[in-house]
């Protein structure tokens, strides 16, 4: 399936995306509808599981292949991907797994989505301080805003790849490159770009993203990316049979973690969710992120001028296209926007 086929073959579009039969769906930044391929994968697996042990009916190499597909979206290595579920959980693993010292500080955008604020706030009990970004324009973080807050005790910057209200995409490469040169870790909440825009991780140490937005997957079936070089620094905060050596399911006398990001997958996998996520990732990789991004931005280039022409105020309408996204926030003084929706 290609972008061109989706655009020109209405029957194909409606078959693969049933929500389009009677809805113009504009809420992928919240929770996506599932594509038909994902529905069918979950349905077929669930039906098979009524016949016995659920793991016996798991598609061959499901977990490995899902990690590989997710790695493909990021330009990462297979060994750097863990299947951990919600973004909040992945970010909490990162927050609690590092060796913080009293007086360390983290650069955070206080008006970010709560999932990327609360895990860092909780580190106050360890003496870690937050340095809150206050960009000149709401939800519009420029590299210089981040760099200006770095001091000798800054250990990490924890930022969203795209702000959930403004739709402004940060320059991940520019920020990450400078942070690395200064010895500062970079953690990214990637849920608003992964699956719809390239989200480069060459200069990123950690990234978490659930599947239920632009990756078109089931809720709570997301991923955690931990750069190979950072895996020894990030201690697993949960322990179980899956991330530790336990031959023949017998507990050993020492904790021997798996040698890659599977060390963060402590227990039995969410097989139903991962079956669905695998199907969605397979489709996204086949269509191609660049093609998806180009198509979305073409729609945005038509939408934003149209809204402005009708008198609406569009948040960051002047942003460079490289910093825009599929999130378009607009309003008009005196108009009931809820009624418009």
Image (cartoon, grey):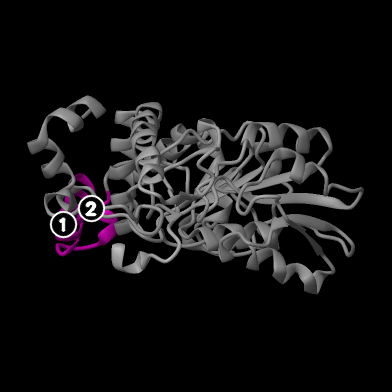
**Residue 106 falls within the magenta-colored stretch:** no
Circle 1 residues within 10 Å: few <14, some 14–19, many ≥20? some
Residue at (27, 51) in percent of width and height: 58
Query: Residue 230, can we see it?
Result: yes
Residue at (89, 62) in percent of width and height: 103
Dot 2: element: helix
- Give the left or right position of residue 117, taking residue 54 as reference: right
Instruction: Tell me the CA gap for discs 2 and 1.
Output: 6 Å
Say which quadrant the C terminus sits in: bottom left
Q: Position of residue 90 (x, y in %)?
A: 56, 57
Query: Residue 341, can we see it?
Result: no
Q: Which stretch did the figure color magenta?
A: 37-58
Residue at (82, 58) in percent of width and height: 105
Circle 2 residues within 10 Å: few <14, some 14–19, many ≥20? some
Query: In the image shown, does 254 or 67 lie closer to the viewer?
Result: 67
Residue, disc 2: 57
Q: Position of residue 176 (x, y in %)?
A: 70, 36
Q: Position of residue 264 (x, y in %)?
A: 57, 55
- Give the left or right position of residue 230, taking residue 170 as reference: right
Query: In the image shown, does 132 or 83 lie closer to the viewer?
Result: 132
**Residue 52 falls within the magenta-colored stretch:** yes
Spot the residue most to the bottom.
125
Contact between marks 2 and 1 (CB within 8 A): the answer is yes
- Give the left or right position of residue 171, taking residue 58 as reference: right
Residue, disc 1: 48
Residue at (71, 71) in percent of width and height: 122
Say which quadrant the N terminus sits in: top left
Dot 1: element: helix
Label at residue 192: none
């Amino acid at each position: 399936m290609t972008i061109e086929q989706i655009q020109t073959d209405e029957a194909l579009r409606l078959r693969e995306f049933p929500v389009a039969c009677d809805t113009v769906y504009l809420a992928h930044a919240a929770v996506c509808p599932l594509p038909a391929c994902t529905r069918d994968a979950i349905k077929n697996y669930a039906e098979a599981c009524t016949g016995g042990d659920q793991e016996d009916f798991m598609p061959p190499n499901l977990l490995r292949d899902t990690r590989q597909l997710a790695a493909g979206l990021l330009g990462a290595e297979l060994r750097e991907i863990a299947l951990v579920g919600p973004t909040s959980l992945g970010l909490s693993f990162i927050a609690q797994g590092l060796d913080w010292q009293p007086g360390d500080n983290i650069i955070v955008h206080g008006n970010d989505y709560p999932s990327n604020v609360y895990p860092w706030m909780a580190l106050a009990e360890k003496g870690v301080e937050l340095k809150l970004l206050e960009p000149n324009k709401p939800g519009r973080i420029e590299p210089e805003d981040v760099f200006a807050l770095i001091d000798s005790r800054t250990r990490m910057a924890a930022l969203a790849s795209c702000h959930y209200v403004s739709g402004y995409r940060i320059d991940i490469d520019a920020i990450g490159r400078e942070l690395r040169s200064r010895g500062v870790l970079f953690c990214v909440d990637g849920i608003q770009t992964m699956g719809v825009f390239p989200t480069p991780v060459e200069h990123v140490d950690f990234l978490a993203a659930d599947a239920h937005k632009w990756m078109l997957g089931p809720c709570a079936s997301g991923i955690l990316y931990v750069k190979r070089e950072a895996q020894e620094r990030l201690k697993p905060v949960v322990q179980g049979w899956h991330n530790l050596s336990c031959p023949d399911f017998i507990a050993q006398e020492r904790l021997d973690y798996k040698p890659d990001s599977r060390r963060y997958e402590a227990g039995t996998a969410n097989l139903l969710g991962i079956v669905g996520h695998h199907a969605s990732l397979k489709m996204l990789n086949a269509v191609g992120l660049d093609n998806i991004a180009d198509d979305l931005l073409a729609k945005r280039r038509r939408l934003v001028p149209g809204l402005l022409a009708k008198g609406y105020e569009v948040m960051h309408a002047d942003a460079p296209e490289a910093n825009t996204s599929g999130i378009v926030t607009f309003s008009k003084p005196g108009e009931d926007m809820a009624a418009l929706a």
